[in-house]
Image (cartoon, rainbow, N blue to C red):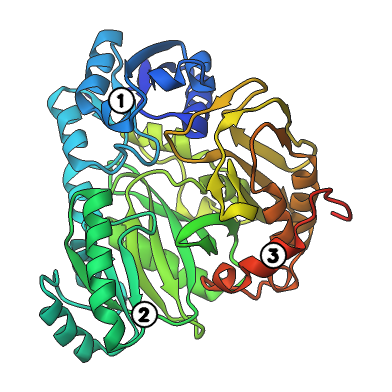
Amino acid sequence: MGGAAMFDKILIANRGEIAVTIIRACRDMGIRTVAVCSEADKTALHTQLADECLCIGPAASKDSYLNPQAILTAAAITGAQAIHPGFGFLSENAAFARMCQKCNIKFIGPDYQIIERMGDKVEARKTAAEAGVPVVPGSADIVGTLADAQKTAEQIGYPIMVKASAGGGGRGMRIAMTEEDLPQAFQTAGSEAVACFGDGRVYLEKFVREPHHIEIQLLADEHGNVIHLGERDCSIQRRNQKILEEARSPFSSDALREKMGKAAVKLARYVGYTGVGTIEFLVDADHNFYFMEMNTRIQVEHPISEAITGVNLIQEQIRSAAGLKLQLKQKDIVFRGHAIECRINAEDPVHSFRPSPGTIRSLHLPGGPGVRVDGAIYQGYTVPPYYDSLLAKLIVYAPDRKQAIARMRRALTEFLISGVETNIDFHLAILRDQDFIEGNYNIGYLGQKTDELLGQMNPYRQDA
């Protein structure tokens, strides 16, 4: 496809709520959509909302949503000009992006070389440092042996994070508080990295105590224009998995936002980034920030940035991929109000958050002013056991944080699902916790508070 002309048809190489969100964005733009599904997803909502749908393989992800040949064949059969990968699956797979290019199908994301460069955590650290963006002190390269790790850790100083080079989503990460902890952390991180990513290479970083996980949303076109849409606080995490996010961060400040935003834009320009992307930072108690990683795709938590800026990120991502110039400049981005997102998962908090697949017998979605639900569930839908447990994202927007918290409590009490266990009441416990209300939390919050919050869960949801 040549020139800056909008796509007529896009294939969505994903499932669940993100596939539904992309289909809706395309429909608003007058773009036809093609859904793909596994045999387990034939009755999923995204297959019913798209203009066309093709089944591309068995339930296992490796045979369907992670099968590049099947997805490209579906695109060719249906005449799709572009593929939107969503998040997860093939969204940060440089080889797939390259295959799309060779097949003359537009991959809605950055160039495969940028994905390759920024997807490798060691290379990304080097690139950030070259661009003048602060990085956490750590090893200059891959650490190949335990002896090398011990030598490097001694130079950096404990505590140390052992991190998978090809990692993501909190996988392949272990903390060594002392020299005695390092052998097990090194072995476990490497083994998990092989299991999750097929790549056991690891590197070391200084462990930042009591950090905040704050990320900057970026938007760039193919003409060198880059802007940021402010920050999101993603510090409410369970085992390195985000479950609740806020925009703006209660820990941040206008000055910190400006500094981090400029650093993120600087890095994006340095690598020639296009589309939407996110720079993730660790921020210490003194508001020093350090580059952690770059996500070269749309994020799960993107709706809260949309809420405070009024920008539809999926649509802007599609426009960028079509070669159109950004309609917005940095001065046009005004941050208004406060937004919170809760990830509603099919899991049982009382029993170690174990997954809870099954059939949804009844469902009531919350509504009212300032409430948005991005989901792919309906009454009678059977949640399959093969994929991520995310059922829906509940997003609220209000003029300030206090009102946003009250609105999220109200929305959570209206969100009724029977047939599967969910973490809705766990979210309510967080929203009622005084430390959260005061913004007094960091990445360690749930590690310290989970048992207390589980004890405070109220199945009857009284006094929201």
Q: Earlier in the sequence, mark 1 or mark 3?
A: 1
Q: CA distance from mark 1 to mark 3?
A: 38 Å
- 420 on left or right of 269: right
**Quadrant of the snapshot with the C terminus:** bottom right
Looking at the image, residue 158 sits to the left or right of residue 461; the answer is left
The quadrant of the rendering that contains the N terminus is top left
- The label number, if any, that marks residue 453 in the structure image: 3
Residue at image mark 1: 64
**Numbered disc 3: secondary structure:** helix
Residue 268 on image: x %, y %: 30, 56
Report the disc number at residue 192: none
Q: Amino acid at mark 3?
A: Leu
Give the Cα distance between marks 2 and 1.
38 Å
Task: Pick the residue in front: 403 or 239.
Answer: 239
The residue located at (51%, 27%) in the rendering is: 20
Give the SS element for disc 1: loop
Distance CA(mark 2)–CA(mark 3):
26 Å
